[in-house]
Amino acid sequence: MDSKKVVHSGGCHCRRVRWKVEAPASVVVWKCDCSNCFMRGNTHFIVPAEKFELLGDSKEFLTAYTFGTHTAKHTFCKICGITSFYIPRSNQDGVAVTFMCVDPGTLTHVEIKNFDGKNWEKSYIESNIASCSKVQNEEIV
């Protein structure tokens, strides 16, 4: 997989929530089967929080949902309801970006990995998902 970083842009369906994120053009996305991700069909890649930036007045259109441990912050657009990103329980220092919400043209490859959200603690340890939000020193193209 190519690890060179690019700037991806994206957001929600109505385009009131917009963001940019620095990440590889080739990403590993996580398909989680926890009760929330499963029902939403969410598949996401995780980046360090400092590589993610909300644009314009996007923040005013966001709201959040929490459940269970109330650690994950499932953000979604107040207008169209799309979760284009959220703060995952597994990576409080990162952002989970819904890969289908990335604007076309910058993602070149997507590798899907499964995360067993029904057995969260075990999957958290075995998957090494926590490493996804750590800053890597890589070149931006």
Image (cartoon, rainbow, N blue to C red):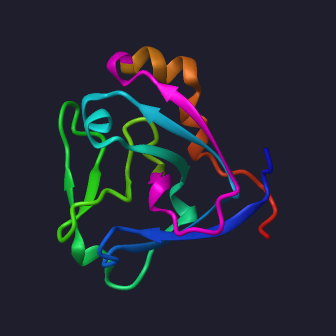
* Residue 105 among those drawn in magenta: yes
Q: How many marks?
A: 0
The part of the image, by quadrant, that contains residue 112 is: top right
Extreme residue toward the front, this view: 104
Residue closer to the observer: 33 or 50: 33
Residue at (65, 48) in percent of width and height? 27
In the image, taking residue 85 as reference, residue 106 lies left or right, namely: right
Quadrant in the picture for the N terminus: top right
Residue at (28, 56) in percent of width and height? 75
* Residue 6 among those drawn in magenta: no
Extreme residue toward the bottom, this view: 56
Q: Residue 9 at x, y = what percent? A: 53, 72
In the image, taking residue 24 as reference, residue 125 lies left or right, namely: left
Q: Residue 70 at x, y = what percent? A: 22, 39
Quadrant in the picture for the C terminus: bottom right
Q: Which residues are magenta?
A: 96-119
The part of the image, by quadrant, that contains residue 60 is: bottom left
Q: Residue 63 at x, y = what percent? A: 20, 62
Residue at (46, 72) in percent of width and height? 19
Q: Residue 125 at x, y = what percent? A: 52, 19
**Residue 80 vertical position relative to residue 95 in the rendered view, above or below:** below
**Residue 44 vertical position relative to residue 33 in the rendered view, above or below:** below
**Residue 62 vertical position relative to residue 125 in the rendered view, above or below:** below
In the image, taking residue 32 as reference, residue 109 lies left or right, namely: right
**Residue 121 vertical position relative to residue 97 in the rendered view, above or below:** above
In the image, taking residue 116 as reference, residue 112 lies left or right, namely: right
Residue at (31, 56) in percent of width and height? 83
